[in-house]
Image (cartoon, coloured by chain):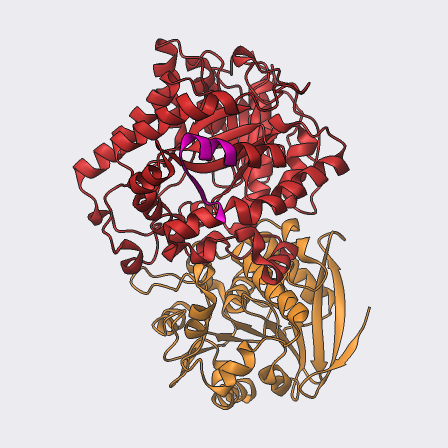
């Protein structure tokens, strides 16, 4: 089992009545902040990631959310590049895992290829490249993309980026959305096969794409793993069987919010209100109509979700969810090291999860408690958890070679858009370079 | 392929028109008799209503379904990527149907499409009726961001009196949960398909082209339109050489539903007049 620290950079000092006062955490006026508050929220976030790197985590994972008070990481590659260099100077063998640049949103896909290539070089070949398809509010409101174009753009951009990394010759890209007379990026990734992961919330088409094309799949379980886990993971492995790929746990990642203290009582005392802050003022304060915009979900998906919204778990109650609600739904796992180990292990072994993204800083959690959570988890929980799957023959094909992985090539398969042919879309003509 | 069904009176047939070198099928619902009238529907898809049934008493109404909004063919939306190409495809549809200088009627998004069509092909229509059209933008007259509106918010964006009988008749969902889910999915997808050409700002350069519209234009607006403010009515009148404006009191964005009689009165007067 691989274990990363996953963190967002929330603004930690929102008023108690934030979620009652503001329509969403995606339209919060910046005037609620102070410069000290912004600085310390961001500085602590970086320091926590570095403490994790020094505490033996296998990876550091961050992601992209623009114009949002619950995560001030507008471009995860800026954070990841700082971490790449810092960890390299300290000789820390930790994966740098932006989960990452949304390709349904990106209007400069070649720049995304360049950023990731730079991170791989800065880290000496420790990049794990995550590509979310794109949250609707982020792609369509923050970046003006019509929601119905999110998936077609993702498909074009991903193909273009993979080719920009791998094609030894300069090439022309004549796409639906982008045209480049020459693509010949410098630098290229050090890794001959950069592990590629796609982040999603359960769309079967996305899963099929990951399984056919040999991408890892990250499931973000914000909606409550006890409510959604069985649906999502059973679906994933059933599609794996249909596609005909082995049920290798290392291809499946799972993001879980975790809070650990000396005892169950102490954990609740330390973390409960910060967890409530995280979800009431974070995901709970993203209105549904900003997460599911017309055209962004396939027509059959909308029909299925209207009849059975189960994939969204606790989401509709999250704005007022109490600590107990969050625990009961599995949105968070909170307790002593033994409690946390038992619950996480049970869940990961039940559903075949080989990559855990442990979210150990969250909401208003202050620096000292975040450090405690990260270090206690590293010392008391992670070592035993890491043994999971070590008795199997599965190789980890979705992890950098320098860190013990055995990456295998991306394979042909369907794209993320329904009713479109298998990629690739890129024109194969080569540019004559003098 | 032709199917017939009864709704609100007239017998409606459907015709599938193959355009774009055979790659795209665009469907039209057709009813009535008389000179041709092309109706372009709003963002959430075609709904045959009493206004169209009324128009079918004096015209042959061709209500054209935007690509991606026809039942069973949702991915047609991916076949055309630019508004300019979509306008050409619509011109092909009108030509294939053999419609010579029809009346063009467009509501909201359909109004924008009608104006784009008439800007590109100034002689395509004999007269044009624009019902609360999208298409122009003024920063001091914000158009509601309908794509991120909650369902309950949508009703107040569309109607001055969302609780009124007219509004309720349009907003009501089928009782059968399966049929209701399919209807919600179809309307949601239609809203996404049309947004491809009017999101994030519902002005794709029409302001620069609109002077080319030469047919007489009637602009109809609900005075209390919460989606596209009535202030735009004068914008349209100022940009088009032969335009007249009719503002309807105590009326929201969907005048043809909320104030059917008044809308019919204005439109009929315009269509029979000599302007």
* Residue sitting nearer the eye, A401 or A365: A365
Query: What residue sits 55% from the left and 59% below the top?
Result: B194
Q: Which residues are magenta?
A: A329-343
Query: What residue sits 66% from the left and 56% below the top?
Result: A300
Q: Give above or below for A298 relative to B124.
A: above
Kindly indicate the quadrant of the structure image that contains residue B44. bottom right
Relative image position of residue B262 (x, y in whole percent): 47, 89
In the rendered image, residue A335 lying in the magenta stretch gets the answer yes
Kindly indicate the quadrant of the structure image that contains residue B42. bottom right
Relative image position of residue B62 (x, y in whole percent): 67, 74
Total numbered badges shown on the rendered structure: 0
Q: Give above or below for A130 relative to B31.
A: above
Q: Give above or below for A395 relative to B184.
A: above
The N terminus of chain A, quarter of image: top right
Q: Chain letter for red, please.
A: A
* Residue sitting nearer the eye, A215 or A335: A335
Q: Give above or below for A55 relative to A239.
A: above
Q: Is residue A338 visible?
A: yes
In the rendered image, residue A170 lying in the magenta stretch gets the answer no
Q: Chain letter for orange, please.
A: B
Relative image position of residue A371 (x, y in whole percent): 30, 27
Q: Is residue A416 visible?
A: no
* Residue sitting nearer the eye, A244 or A212: A244
| A146 sits to left or right of A44 | right
Relative image position of residue A185 (x, y in whole percent): 50, 19
The C terminus of chain A, quarter of image: top right
| A89 sits to left or right of A32 | right
Kindly indicate the quadrant of the structure image that contains residue B16. bottom right
Query: What residue sits 64% from the left and 50% below the top?
Result: B78
* Residue sitting nearer the eye, A369 or A285: A369
Which residue occupies the extreme right position in the image? B1
């Amino acid at each position: 089992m691989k274990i990363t620290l996953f963190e967002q950079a929330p603004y930690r000092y929102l008023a108690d009545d934030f979620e009652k006062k503001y329509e969403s955490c995606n339209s919060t006026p910046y005037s609620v902040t102070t410069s000290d508050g912004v600085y310390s929220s961001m500085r602590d976030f970086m320091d926590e990631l570095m403490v994790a790197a020094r505490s033996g985590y296998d990876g550091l994972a961050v992601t992209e959310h623009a114009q949002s008070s619950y995560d001030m990481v507008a471009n995860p590659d800026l954070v990841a590049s700082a971490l790449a260099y810092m960890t390299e100077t300290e000789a820390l063998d930790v994966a740098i895992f932006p989960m990452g640049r949304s390709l349904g949103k990106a209007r400069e896909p070649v720049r995304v290829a360049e950023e990731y290539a730079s991170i791989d070089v800065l880290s000496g070949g420790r990049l794990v490249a995550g590509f979310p398809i794109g949250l609707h509010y982020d792609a369509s409101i923050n970046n003006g993309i019509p929601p119905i174009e999110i998936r077609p753009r993702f498909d074009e951009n991903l193909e273009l980026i993979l080719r920009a990394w791998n094609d030894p010759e300069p090439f022309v890209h004549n796409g639906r959305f982008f045209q480049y007379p020459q693509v010949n990026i410098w630098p290229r990734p050090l890794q001959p096969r950069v592990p590629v992961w796609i982040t999603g919330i359960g769309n079967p088409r996305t899963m099929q794409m990951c399984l056919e094309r040999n991408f890892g799949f990250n499931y973000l379980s914000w909606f409550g793993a006890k409510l959604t886990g069985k649906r999502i993971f059973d679906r994933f492995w059933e599609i794996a069987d249909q596609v005909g790929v082995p049920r290798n746990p290392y291809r499946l990642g799972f993001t879980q919010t975790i809070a650990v203290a000396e005892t169950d009582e102490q954990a609740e005392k330390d973390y409960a209100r910060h967890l409530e802050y995280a979800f009431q003022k974070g995901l709970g304060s993203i209105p549904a109509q900003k997460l599911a915009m017309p055209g962004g979900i396939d027509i059959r998906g909308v029909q299925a979700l209207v009849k059975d919204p189960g994939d969204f778990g606790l989401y509709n109650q999250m704005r007022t969810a109490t600590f107990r609600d969050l625990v009961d739904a599995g949105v968070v796992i909170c307790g002593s090291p033994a409690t946390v180990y038992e619950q996480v292990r049970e869940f990961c072994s039940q559903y075949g999860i080989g990559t855990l993204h442990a979210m150990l800083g969250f909401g208003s959690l202050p620096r000292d408690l975040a450090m405690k959570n990260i270090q206690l988890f590293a010392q008391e929980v992670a070592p035993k958890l890491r043994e999971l799957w070590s008795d199997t023959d599965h190789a980890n094909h979705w992890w950098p070679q320098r860190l013990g992985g055995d990456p295998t090539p991306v394979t042909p398969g369907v794209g993320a858009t329904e009713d479109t042919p298998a990629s690739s879309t890129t024109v194969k003509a080569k540019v004559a370079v003098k | 392929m032709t199917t017939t069904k009864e709704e609100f009176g007239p017998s409606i047939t459907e015709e599938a028109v193959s355009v774009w070198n055979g790659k795209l099928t665009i469907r039209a619902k057709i009813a009535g008799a008389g000179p041709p009238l092309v109706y372009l529907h709003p963002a959430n898809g075609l709904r045959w209503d009493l206004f169209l049934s009324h128009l079918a008493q004096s015209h042959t109404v061709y209500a054209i379904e935007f690509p991606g909004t026809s039942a069973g063919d949702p991915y047609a939306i991916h076949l055309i990527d630019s508004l300019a190409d979509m306008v050409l495809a619509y011109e092909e549809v009108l030509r294939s149907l053999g419609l010579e200088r029809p009346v063009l009627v467009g509501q909201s998004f359909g109004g924008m499409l009608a104006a784009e069509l008439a800007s590109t092909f100034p002689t395509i229509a004999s007269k044009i009726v624009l019902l609360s059209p999208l298409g122009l933008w003024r920063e001091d007259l914000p158009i509601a961001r309908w794509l991120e509106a909650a369902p309950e918010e949508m009703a107040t964006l569309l109607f001055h009196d969302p609780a009124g009988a007219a509004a309720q008749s349009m907003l009501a969902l089928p009782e059968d949960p399966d049929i209701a889910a399919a209807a919600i999915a179809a309307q949601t997808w239609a809203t996404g398909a049309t947004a491809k050409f009017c999101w994030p700002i519902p002005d794709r350069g029409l302001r620069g082209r609109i002077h080319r519209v030469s047919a007489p234009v009637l602009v109809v607006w609900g005075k209390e339109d919460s989606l596209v403010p009535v202030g735009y009515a004068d914008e349209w009148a100022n940009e088009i050489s032969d335009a007249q404006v009719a503002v309807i009191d105590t009326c929201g964005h969907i005048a043809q539903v909320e104030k059917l009689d008044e809308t019919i009165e204005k439109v009929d007067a315009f269509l029979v007049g000599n302007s």
